[in-house]
Amino acid sequence: RGLQFAGTSALARKSTLQPDELPTFAIWKKQYDSVIRENHLEEIESEEGAQLIIEEWYYDPRNISHADTVDPLSLYLSLQENPDERIQIALDEMMETIPWSKG
């Protein structure tokens, strides 16, 4: 299985948020080195010249979601403290589509 979209890249797929220029992916922290090596990726310190962003997760997000994005609850939790109002609106929009989140 391939990498899953995370962060605002995943949120853009689940709401009307416009995606960031650089796609963001989530990988299990234990697989970071092998993913970098297998995909011939080079780690850089700055976003300048970057082609993507990789988030290291403490668990394998592919065990929870088999879609091309991380699961909605993990996505919500990863972005809930983001101060950007657009992201907060998009998170609310996404959560409204999930049947178990309706009260």
Image (cartoon, helix red, strand yellow):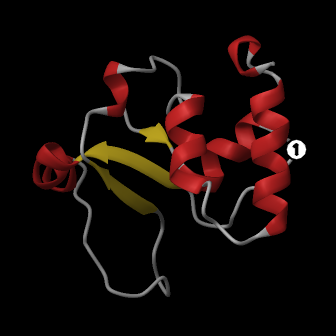
> How far across and how far down the image is residue 45, in percent?
33, 86
Say which quarter of the image contains residue 87.
bottom right
Q: Is residue 83 above or below residue 24?
A: below
Residue 1 can be seen in this image:
no
Q: Is residue 11 above or below residue 66?
A: below
The image quadrant where one finds the N terminus is top left
The residue lying at 84 percent from left, 62 percent from top is 86
The residue lying at 67 percent from left, 67 percent from top is 21
Is residue 75 left or right of 1 when viewed as pictured? right
> How far across and how far down the image is residue 10, in percent?
62, 43
> How far across and how far down the image is residue 16, in percent?
88, 44
Say which quarter of the image contains residue 59.
top left
What element does badge 1 sit on? loop
> How far across and how far down the image is residue 82, in percent?
64, 66
Is residue 87 left or right of 77 when viewed as pictured? right
Residue 58 can be seen in this image:
yes
Q: Which residue carries the number 1 mark?
A: 16
Tell me if mark 1 has few (under 14), some (14-19) or many (20+) residues whose alpha carbon lies within 10 angstroms of its own. Answer: some
Which of the two residues, 48 or 97, is positioned nearer the viewer here?
97
Which of the two residues, 91 or 25, is positioned nearer the viewer here?
91
Say which quarter of the image contains residue 62.
top left
Q: What type is the residue that disc 1 sits on?
A: Thr
Q: Is residue 36 above or below residue 51?
A: above
Q: Residue furthest front?
A: 103
The residue lying at 38 percent from left, 58 percent from top is 54
The image quadrant where one finds the C terminus is top right
The residue lying at 70 percent from left, 72 percent from top is 83
